[in-house]
Image: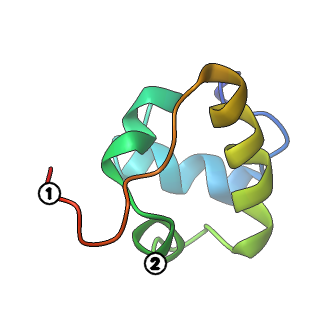
Amino acid sequence: MNPEFPKLSKPAHRALANANILKLEDLRKWTEKDLLSLHGIGPSAIPPLKAAMKKAGIAFKKPGARK
């Protein structure tokens, strides 16, 4: 389990790893909607991720934003 992603279930950790999301910084490339489309990521995974991202000063990609 990745210590950068606290309070997530094992399926959520696996989903992030399978999508090559290995650091909080990697989440900048994803919208919340896209992240929720991953098998293993449910609505309960978003609040702890947002909290960790806010603490690190980063945010999800805005819908419609270019990479």
* Whether residue 47 is situated above or below residue 55 in the rendered picture: below
Amino acid carrying mark 1 in the image: Arg
C-alpha separation, residue under disc 2 versus residue under disc 1: 19 Å
Q: Is residue 27 left or right of residue 5?
A: left
Which residue in the rendered view is the most extreme toward the left?
66
Res 3 → quadrant? top right
Q: Of helix, strand and loop, which one carries label 2?
A: loop
SS of the residue under disc 1: loop
Q: Which residue is mark 1?
A: 66
* Coordinates of residue 50 in the picture (x, y in percent): 69, 47
* Amino acid at dot 2: Ser
Residue 41, percent from left and from top: 61, 67
Looking at this view, is 44 or 50 the one in front? 50
Rate crowding at label 2 as few (under 14), some (14 to 19) or many (20 or more) other CA atoms within 10 Å. Answer: few
Residue that carries the numbered disc 2 in the rendered image: 37
Residue 65 as seen in the image, left or right of residue 40: left
The residue at 24%/72% (across/down) is 64
Residue at image point 38% right, 35% down = 26
Q: Nearer the viewer, mark 2 or mark 1?
A: 1
Q: How has the structure been colored for display?
A: rainbow
Q: Residue at the location (39% across, 50% down)?
A: 18
Question: Quick check: 63 left or right of 9?
Answer: left
Q: Is residue 21 left or right of residue 40?
A: left
The residue located at (46%, 42%) in the rendering is 17
Q: Are marks 2 and 1 in contact (CB under 8 Å)?
A: no
Residue 45's place in the image compared with 20, above or below, is: below
* Image spot of residue 16 (x, y percent): 49, 49
Up-down relation of residue 49 to residue 1 (above or below): below
Q: Which picture quadrant has residue 55?
A: top right
